[in-house]
Amino acid sequence: MTRDRAGRRGRRFAAAAVALGAALALTACSDGGSTTGTDDVADQGYVSGDGSFTQWAADDRQGPVEVAGTDYAGQPVDVADWRGDVVVLNTWYAACPPCREEAPDLVDIANEYADAGVHLLGINGVDDAGAAEPFQQTFDVPYPSIDDRDKHAIAALQGIVPIQATPTTVVLDRDGKVAARIVGLAEGSTLRALIDEVLAEDGTGTAVGGAGA
């Protein structure tokens, strides 16, 4: 009987461990290739993949971010071409569950904010076109994604805003500097609020109407 009870406890423990692992996988997918130094100014209060967000006042923002690459249609993309506009960067790959969960919100935001001059750009460091394009077609994604299997775009971000989980979403102000970051799944309402705050700035980090950022 003692052996049976121990066996049942062992099986229950193993099942709980599997369930916990599955829950963590749904929260965020590690990209496995990102490293962060202890001196990274944007790394304060980091919690992996829990959907938390961080904002930076204009005087504390790092950048401008220099991200460029080739999208899955073979076209060059460079965020420097969007200086003067608000830019949203999102890391993803097709087999990442939270990436799929947040995709409809990102698509809606891209469409809703297009007339306001907001640009979205995906950064995919895992997939070739055969995996990425079906994802984009399934969710009717209207914005480009960089094929970043060479990790150049992620390398450009590291040290400015650590990318330690996939998905991670970064909002750049009109000067190309990091205004906000969401680590893990980006809730639509949260991302909209972060974008709205940056859109309300006059280009100097000051909210239109005179209020501080």
Image: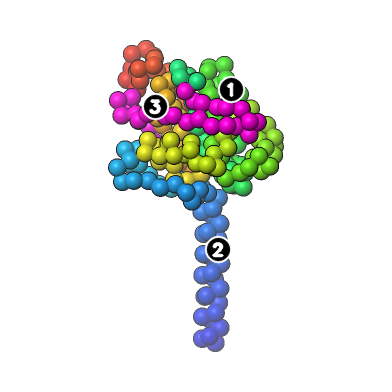
Is disc 3 surrounded by few (<14), some (14 to 19) or many (20+) residues within 10 Å? some
In-front residue for pair 183/82: 82
Please tell me whether residue 113 is drawn above or below residue 93 in the rendered image.
above
Residue 202, quarter of picture:
top left
Verify whether residue 55 appears in magenta.
yes
Which residue was labeled with disc 3? 64
Q: Position of residue 70 (x, y in %)?
A: 57, 32
Chain-order first, disc 1 or disc 2: 2
- Tell me the amino acid under the disc marked 2: Val
Verify whether residue 165 appears in magenta.
no
Q: Classify residue 13 as left or right of residue 161.
A: right
Using the rendered image of the protein, determine whether residue 13 is visible from the camera's viewpoint: yes
Which residue was labeled with disc 2? 18
In-front residue for pair 91/196: 91
Image quarter where the C terminus lies is top left
Q: Classify residue 137 as left or right of residue 53.
A: right
What is the span of residues highlighted in magenta in the rendered image? Answer: 52-80
Which residue was labeled with disc 1? 112
- Tell me the amino acid under the disc marked 1: Glu
Image quarter where the N terminus lies is bottom right
Chain-order first, disc 3 or disc 2: 2
Is disc 1 surrounded by few (<14), some (14 to 19) or many (20+) residues within 10 Å? few
How much space separates mark 3 and mark 2, taking CA atoms?
42 Å
Please tell me whether residue 172 is drawn above or below residue 130 in the rendered image.
above
